Amino acid sequence: METHDFFLYLLIILLTARIFAELAVRMQAPSVIGELLAGVVLGPSLLGWIEPLETIKLMAEIGIILLLFEVGLGTDIKRLVRTGAKSIVVALLGFVLPLALGFALGYWVFKLPLLVSLFIGGTLTATSIGITVRVLSDLKRQHAPEGQIVLGAAVLDDVMGVVLLALLYEFSLGGGVSLISAGKVLVFVGAFFILAPIAAKMISLIIKRFDEVSEIPGLLPTTIVSLVLFFAWLANALGAPELLGGFAAGLALSRRFFLPLGIALHADEQFAGRIEEQMRPIVHLFTPIFFVFVGLSLSLREIDWGSPFIWWFSLSLLAAAVIGKLVGAFIIKEPWPARWAIGLAMTPRGEVGLIFAELGRVSGIFSNEVHAGMVIVIALTTLLPPFIMKWFYGRYAGRMSGY
């Protein structure tokens, strides 16, 4: 590929992603839907202007790692402790039930292989904390009791989702499910989650010291991006996906991070805030490339839309995705409007679900039809809940005002 052609492709991707994201937000939809649609329009599904080239894929992978860094940076472990058992119940059932339902549908109903069915179930476990937080903030309910339960559950959902992603990644490399591989990954992931945040905290102290004396602008984003990329490489070297390194680095540098077992390192709120502020433009530059790449990778023209499979597959998984999140909320002891609100808030899959689906496609686990069906489910569970939540609170806000 000629250099000037790549520049043109990148220009088109960035501008189109931004335009579609802006349009999506103005229509009260998550920006990720607009970026995904931009890829569908530019790619082989519609206009066919841009192919999912290797150079774009590499930039998309940087976008995934930085996206998980941002998720880790915004993770509040203390929130999970404060909300207690209710958040844990919502998170565990909201994780296990979609996994079980998705696997059962794939393996027994649609007769798909074991590993494909596990990937399907794993994709349904995701909850997009970014979309959830945004909707709750718009509704001024993030500090309400049900909002605290949702945010605490979403934190645990993120952690369990990343661990499951590491397991599925190992299975995809090995070509099948193995207890030995699973045990190895869990040991590595456990060690990584314990040691990586400590190392990141120590390194951040060095970065902070150099930042105080440096006379050249840009030291902070340069060193933080380098730290994230190093942890991504280290995660891969230990047999885990690179994404885990980005998540661990973000978790460690979060102003809300604390170490387990009572061990604590002093957190500098101002320094953590500067990291968030200076990293945000870089994250928001690369992450749209990932979502556009997902759209570019969809070949909707190659799918037989007259086949009953794609419709039954998408609709049944959509039902499993919604029911799996609602049940956990229904079990806890809260007023019924609050239970519905919690279940709806846990439903959006967003960027986390797309990461699972893309890993399934890249590793060759998902066929084009299965991947397209998963993206349809993720898009619907991302697009519809914000609208339903706004309608729900508009109708039942009076019943929850004293809650």
Image (tube, rainbow, N blue to C red):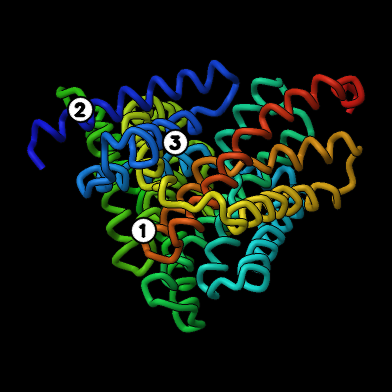
Image position, residue 326 (x, y; %): 78, 47
Identify which residue is drawn at 60% across, 62% down: 121
Q: Residue furthest top?
A: 26
Q: Is residue 260 above or below residue 227?
A: below
Quarter-of-image position of residue 44:
top left
Label 2 vs 1, first from the N-terminus: 2
Quickly name the residue at label 3. 36
Identify which residue is drawn at 51% across, 58% down: 370
- Left or right, residue 66 beside residue 115: left
Q: Quadrant of the N terminus?
A: top left
Three-letter amino acid code at the position of disc 3: Leu
Q: 250 or 330: which is nearer to us? A: 330
Q: CA distance from mark 2 to mark 1?
A: 44 Å
Q: Can residue 201 be seen by looking at this rendering?
A: no
Label 1 vs 3, first from the N-terminus: 3
Camera-near label (2 vs 1) is: 1
Camera-near label (2 vs 3) is: 3
Quickly name the residue at label 1. 362
Three-letter amino acid code at the position of disc 1: Val
Image position, residue 165 (x, y; %): 48, 60
Identify which residue is drawn at 20% across, 45% down: 55
Q: CA distance from mark 1 to mark 3?
A: 17 Å
Q: How many marks?
A: 3
Quickly name the residue at label 2. 213
For mark 1, does the 10 Å Cα neighbourhood hold few (<14), some (14 to 19), or many (20 or more) residues? few
Image position, residue 288 (x, y; %): 37, 33
